[in-house]
Amino acid sequence: MTTPSPQRTSDVNGRLWGARARDWAEVQEAQFAGGYDHVLASAGVRVGTRLLDAGCGAGLAARRAADLGAIVAGIDAAPLLLDIARERCPDGDFREGDLEELPHADDSFDVVTGFNAFQFAANPVAALTEARRVTRPGGIVAVMTWGRPDGMEAASVVAALRPLLPAPPPGAPGPFALSDPDRLSGFVADAGLVPREVIEGDIFWTYPDEATALRGLNSSGVAIRAAGLVGEAAVSAAHAAALAPFRQADGGFRIGARYMAVLALA
């Protein structure tokens, strides 16, 4: 009799992040588009670039890379998000799987991107090592994460659900775990990559009204987990309170955010 294998981190993440796939794709994913564009430009993505987006979600970054002429592929744990990615990029190669076991041959890509993805793998260094394996020698692995939280408006929104969730285990990666240039560069170096440059930028989350903002914010995997513990109403109330300081005169919201990315050579 064989012993059942333990549940993979990707199984849990796929269920959580796919629970409201359309809401994520139509509202929240676009809030990060400026960061995607900055990373793609810095990585030199152009016509003919073979690009893999690891943790591709609903495929917005892949779509923007395809618009630059790239040949795109993606991997994610959430089948419902992948369905949307395939709608957005019909010619793309999108697969369900784990970042630690990429279903691609060595040296398959010129660029591998990970937008708030690698650090949340069950084994982040193993995931980055896999990214290096499938990137051609001299190609680029780009890892984007949150920028420094000090003074960032969006940090208070990100933290809004913390009181509703159990305390994380010691050593668990938080959203700002890599929000330091030296720490981010060290993270990729541990996987055998050579940091080339760290880039930073500012973006704004914008919503026309509170209902749309809640639709987007409540679609994250973290929000789905919290709702399962304390209920949807409590999650909405926490997000509404965090949004309140950023309400504009027209009833919409504008919230400053910051990202940081390291571009490393394989």
Image (tube, rainbow, N blue to C red):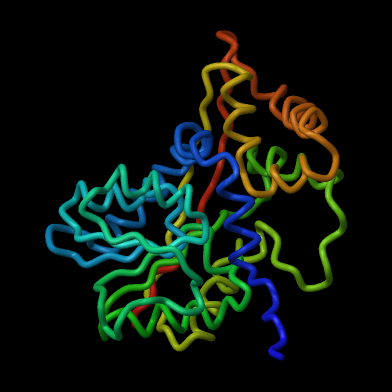
Dividing the picture into quadrants, the one containing residue 12 is bottom right
Q: Residue at x 74, y 29 (%)?
A: 236
Residue nearest the viewer, comparing 215 with 197: 215
Q: Looking at the image, how many numbered discs can be counted on the residues?
A: 0
Q: Position of residue 122 (x, y in %)?
A: 63, 74
- The answer, for residue 138, to whether it is visible in the render is no
Q: Name the spot of residue 109 as percent of width and height, x first.
A: 26, 74
Of residue 179 and residue 215, the one placed in the foreground of this image is: 215
In this rendering, is residue 48 above or below 246?
below
Residue 236 visible in the current orientation? yes
Give the residue at x 40% y 67%: 142
Image quarter of residue 136: bottom left
**Residue 109 in the figure: left or right of residue 210:** left
For the N terminus, which image quadrant?
bottom right
Left or right: where 104 falls relative to 58? left
Q: Is residue 172 left or right of residue 29?
A: right
Identify the residue at image location x=65%, y=35%: 218
Residue 68 pos. (x, y %): 19, 50
- Quadrant (top left/top right/bottom left/bottom right) for the C terminus: bottom left
View extreme (top): residue = 250
